[in-house]
Image (cartoon, grey):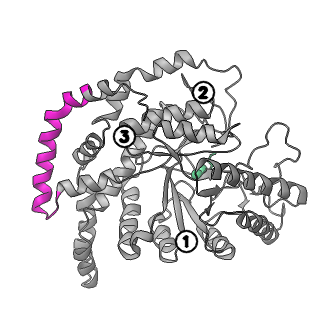
């Protein structure tokens, strides 16, 4: 595997932190042992954690108003892969990339697959894009794509999704994520039921093109860019569509795609219970689809989501394997730093959820010991598992402190010199 960051630098940085890490690790180990937990087992568990990086996350996304390009932004899918390799090399928690087409469309799919492999990466779910018009495209998505009233528009959108499956197949992916912004901005703009019927008809064609070992993930989102009625607005609609389509169709939960204060962990529990939890787009949010770094606003919610995932994993066993992906956008941070931080925060919630004594919790719930049950969760959430995460990274060949190591590497300066900002690359855009 090609190391993008000098392996010697990572080793030096780790050596400088070694004594401190060992001391913190021993301290935490003693505290966990008193709670009947083995720190090395938890570290081994942390080492199994993986979350995919969204290819679009390597660039600066912007808002609906403006985009401020960052220094050394990747200009093509190969440069995005290089940035993703840095994230994985230092965190050891992001071995795969979720590409978006046509943004990442390769001229040679096997070259893309081989390049990723050489960088120690593979591909997770591929994403289609029918929320934007592309240059030279015959039909416009201005009034919708899979739900359009025009058969020609729907056919074009279906064909694009099928092409995504084909490219995905060639690069070793096994899932397609479909998010459509389709909906209405005005009451009366379209027939609410008719739009969903057309969506299902289109999705049936896409579903029919899925290889046997593939899944299609339906991503719901409350609003934006449709501000009155989004066709796939909520998990109920997503669940109904996934059920209608068949076993290969599942729901994808993007944490930012719900109304404020929605109990997202309960949605997770429901979807898991009925076998329709396909995966996640992890990010954080204060108001809407803010696409902020995971754990930056509401880490307790992230923990509670993983608490449900741990419960589901216990019930369902090996077969329960939702896809974990990040989906975030950066305006004011270095995307590599933010993605490393997010991967670490999702991993943190995963490890914290393993601290919960589930048998004890079940007993407390049976006896209606409400306060102690709540404290059981809080105790796990309050435990600072940072030394476990750092040790897991070091034992897997990564960096004890990815951020410090990345900054010391000078990677951003190096790529900034090689990747000049493109003229006109400052348009706005939703991601
Ligand atoms: C849009 O809001 C969704 O989160 C999608 O996942 C979208 O495809 C992605 O953010 C890239 O634009
Ligand atoms: Zn998303
Ligand atoms: Zn989103």
**Is residue 26 one of those drawn in magenta?**
yes
Mark 3 neighbour density, 10 Å: few (under 14) some (14–19) many (20 or more): many
With respect to residue 238, does 409 lie above or below? above
Instruction: Provide the secondary structure element on which disc 3 rests.
Output: helix
Q: Position of residue 247 (x, y in %)?
A: 61, 74
Instruction: Provide the secondary structure element on which disc 2 rests.
Output: loop
Which one is in front, 87 or 190?
A: 87
Q: Position of residue 307 (x, y in %)?
A: 36, 65
Instruction: Provide the secondary structure element on which disc 1 rests.
Output: loop
Q: What residue is disc 3 on? A: 91
User: As drawn, which residue projects farthest toward the bottom?
Assistant: 367
The residue located at (58%, 65%) in the rendering is 251
Mark 2 neighbour density, 10 Å: few (under 14) some (14–19) many (20 or more): some
Q: In which quadrant of the rendered view does residue 373 lie?
A: bottom left
With respect to residue 281, does 217 lie above or below? below
Q: Position of residue 185 (x, y in %)?
A: 77, 55
Main SS of residues in magenta: helix
Q: What residue is disc 2 on? A: 68
Q: Earlier in the sequence, mark 1 or mark 2?
A: 2
Tell me how far mark 1 sits from mark 3, CA to CA. 30 Å
Q: In which quadrant of the rendered view does residue 8 lie?
A: top left
> Is residue 357 visible in the rendered structure shown here?
yes
Q: Earlier in the sequence, mark 1 or mark 3?
A: 3
């Amino acid at each position: 595997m090609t190391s993008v960051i000098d392996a010697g630098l990572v080793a030096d940085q780790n050596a400088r932190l070694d004594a401190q890490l060992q001391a913190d690790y021993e301290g935490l180990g003693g505290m966990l042992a008193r709670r009947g937990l083995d720190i090395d087992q938890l570290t081994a568990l942390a080492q199994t954690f993986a979350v995919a990086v969204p290819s679009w996350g390597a660039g600066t996304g912007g808002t609906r108003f403006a985009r401020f390009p960052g220094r050394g932004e990747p200009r093509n899918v190969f440069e995005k892969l290089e940035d993703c390799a840095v994230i994985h090399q230092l965190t050891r928690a992001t071995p795969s990339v979720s590409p978006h087409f046509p943004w990442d469309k390769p001229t040679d799919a096997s070259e893309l697959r081989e390049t990723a492999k050489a960088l120690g990466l593979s591909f997770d779910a591929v994403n289609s894009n029918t929320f934007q018009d592309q240059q030279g495209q015959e039909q416009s998505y201005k009034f919708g794509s899979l739900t359009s009233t025009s058969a020609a528009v729907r056919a074009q959108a279906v064909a694009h999704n099928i092409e995504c499956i084909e490219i995905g197949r060639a690069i070793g992916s096994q899932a397609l994520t479909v998010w459509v912004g389709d909906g209405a901005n005005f009451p009366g703009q379209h027939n609410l039921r008719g739009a969903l019927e057309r969506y299902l008809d289109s999705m049936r064609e896409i579903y029919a093109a899925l290889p046997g070992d593939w899944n299609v993930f339906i991503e719901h989102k409350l609003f934006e860019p449709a501000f009155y009625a989004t066709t796939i607005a909520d998990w109920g609609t997503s669940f109904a569509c996934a059920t209608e389509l068949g076993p290969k169709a599942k729901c994808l939960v993007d944490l930012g795609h719900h109304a404020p204060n929605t109990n997202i962990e309960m949605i997770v529990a429901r979807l898991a219970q009925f076998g329709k939890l396909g995966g996640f787009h992890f990010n954080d949010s204060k108001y809407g689809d803010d696409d902020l770094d995971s754990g930056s606003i509401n880490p307790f919610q992230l923990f509670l989501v993983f608490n449900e995932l741990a419960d589901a994993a216990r019930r369902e066993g090996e077969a329960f394997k939702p896809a974990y992906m990040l989906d975030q956008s950066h305006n004011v941070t270095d995307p590599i730093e933010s993605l490393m931080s997010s991967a670490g925060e999702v991993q943190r919630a995963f490890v914290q959820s393993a601290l919960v004594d589930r048998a004890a919790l079940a007993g407390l719930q049976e006896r209606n010991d409400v306060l102690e049950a709540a404290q059981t969760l809080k105790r796990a959430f309050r435990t600072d598992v940072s030394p476990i995460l750092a040790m897991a990274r070091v034992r897997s060949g990564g960096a004890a402190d990815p951020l410090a190591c990345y900054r010391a590497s000078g990677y951003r300066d190096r790529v900034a010199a090689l990747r000049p900002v493109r003229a006109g690359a400052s348009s706005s855009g939703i991601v």
